[in-house]
Amino acid sequence: MNVGKTLFAQIMEFVPWTSFSRIVARYGGDSGVRRLTCSEQFRVMAFAQLTWRESLRDIEVTLGANSSKLYAMGFRHSIHRMPSGAGHDAMKMHQVMPQAMLFVRGENQGISHNPLECTTADDIQLSINALASFIHHMSQEV
């Protein structure tokens, strides 16, 4: 039986949370938010990307099936059903704070939101470097 941190919790330790919090505070990202804070939203979306979830329903079901492990993974709230239509989260979030999207080059002729979607480890590393650089740059402006 594993008594240490989950792999997801260990990966989340690499996120520069102090810089992340400064950016959220700068743009008032958590103002008026009761439960789904920016950091919690980030954790959910990171989990979805790292575990190849295909939809919001897939994310909800997977996290719900592991509800006893959520706290150890870094989540601080239980999972609730999130009805959603087509479109990116940024469509609603832009009303609260500025949004940016990081697109990662994919293989298979650009198939996305599909089990056939894939990318190389090198492209993932480039994306991680770009995100880290962006977070660092934004935190310097605060």
Image: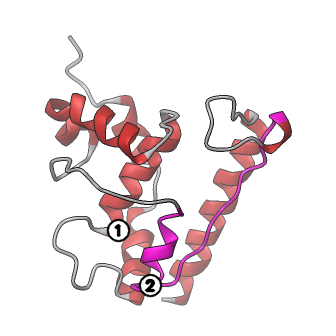
Q: Is residue 101 magenta?
A: yes
* Above or below 79: residue 62: above
Residue type indicated by callout 2? Met
Residue on which disc 2 sits: 97
* Above or below 13: residue 3: above
Residue type indicated by callout 1? Cys
Q: Main secondary structure of the magenta part?
A: loop
Query: For the image shown, how many numbered marks are present on the structure?
Result: 2
Residue on which disc 1 sits: 38
Give the quadrant of residue 2.
Answer: top left
What element does badge 1 sit on?
helix
- Measuring 62% from the left and 77% from the top, which residue is drawn there? 137
- Measuring 26% from the left and 46% from the top, which residue is drawn there? 74
29 horizontally vs 48: left or right: left
Give the quadrant of residue 107.
Answer: top right
Q: Earlier in the sequence, mark 2 or mark 1?
A: 1
What element does badge 2 sit on?
loop
136 horizontally vs 68: left or right: right
- Residue stretch in magenta: 87-108
Looking at this rendering, what residue extends furthest in the top direction? 1
Q: Answer yes or no: do the residues labelled 2 and 1 have beta carbons within 8 Å? A: yes
- Measuring 52% from the left and 34% from the top, which residue is drawn there? 52
Q: Position of residue 37 (x, y in %)?
A: 27, 68
Foreground residue among 21 and 67: 67
Foreground residue among 32 and 15: 32
Looking at this rendering, what residue extends furthest in the front direction? 85
Q: Position of residue 18 (x, y in %)?
A: 38, 69
* Mark identifier at residue 65: none
